[in-house]
Amino acid sequence: MRLWRRLYIGRNPLARPGDRLEARLLVTFLLLALAAIPMAASLGSETYAGRLAEAADEAGTRYQTTAELLADAPVTVPTSEVESADVAATWRLPDGTQHVGEVPAHRGAARGTEVPIWLDERGNLTEPPTTRIGAATDATSVALSVWLGVVMLCALVFLTVRGVLSRFRSTQWARDWARVEREWTRR
């Protein structure tokens, strides 16, 4: 009931026009936040479909192979807390040619350890293809970000208007109090 009275000021004789404006603005922004849910879900769905198409394309152009480490991976990396380090390794391309380069390997991996790597169609190192879970995670992130952005924008505008109305009310209260004070001091 308290929330209903706050949102629906109605014909309360003590409610000022600023109170009514603030209540209407709050209801409007709550409805806007609710209306943003389908929009955010739609953007998330489009992102998911796009990432799945991208994953299908990547699955056709990327392949996994193994690389053999040519050196021991460092045990510790003093400047960061990364779990992997780039280590010299060798691997074979699909045409049979030997390739040498640096690949990420777990810290402490010994020379001769086989490390799984992903290559593109030209034989260059690349990231693994996007998975369904990765696409779903990206879509969820987009949907939540959009919705939270709308909610934060509504909250920011509401709090700004509320602050302006509060200052206006304080100024009005000070003016009215000064007028009443003069009348009380005359008697």
Image (spheres, rainbow, N blue to C red):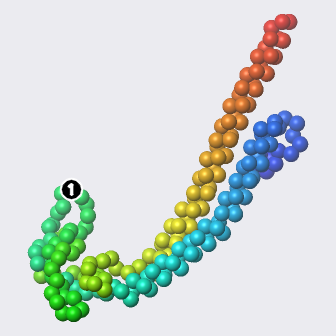
Q: Is residue 184 left or right of residue 57?
A: right
Say which amino acid is labelled 1.
Thr
x, y percent for residue 99: 16, 83
Q: Quadrant of residue 119?
A: bottom left
x, y percent for residue 112: 12, 82
Foreground residue among 176 and 102: 102
x, y percent for residue 124: 26, 80
Question: Which quadrant: the C terminus?
Answer: top right
Q: At 58% across and 70% down in the image, what residue appears?
A: 43
Name the outermost residue toward the front.
Answer: 122
- Residue 109 makes an appearance in the image: no
| Vertical placement of residue 86 versus 151, above or below | below
Q: Secondary structure at mark 1?
A: loop
Q: Is residue 103 left or right of residue 178?
A: left
Q: Quadrant of residue 175?
A: top right
Q: At 21% across and 75% down in the image, what residue appears?
A: 103
Q: At 66% across and 37% down in the image, what residue appears?
A: 163
Q: At 62% across and 72% down in the image, what residue appears?
A: 42
- Where does label 1 land, which residue? 79
| Vertical placement of residue 11 versus 92, above or below | above
| Vertical placement of residue 27 versus 142, above or below | above
Residue count near mark 1 (Cα–Cα under 10 Å), binned few <14, some 14–19, many ≥20: few
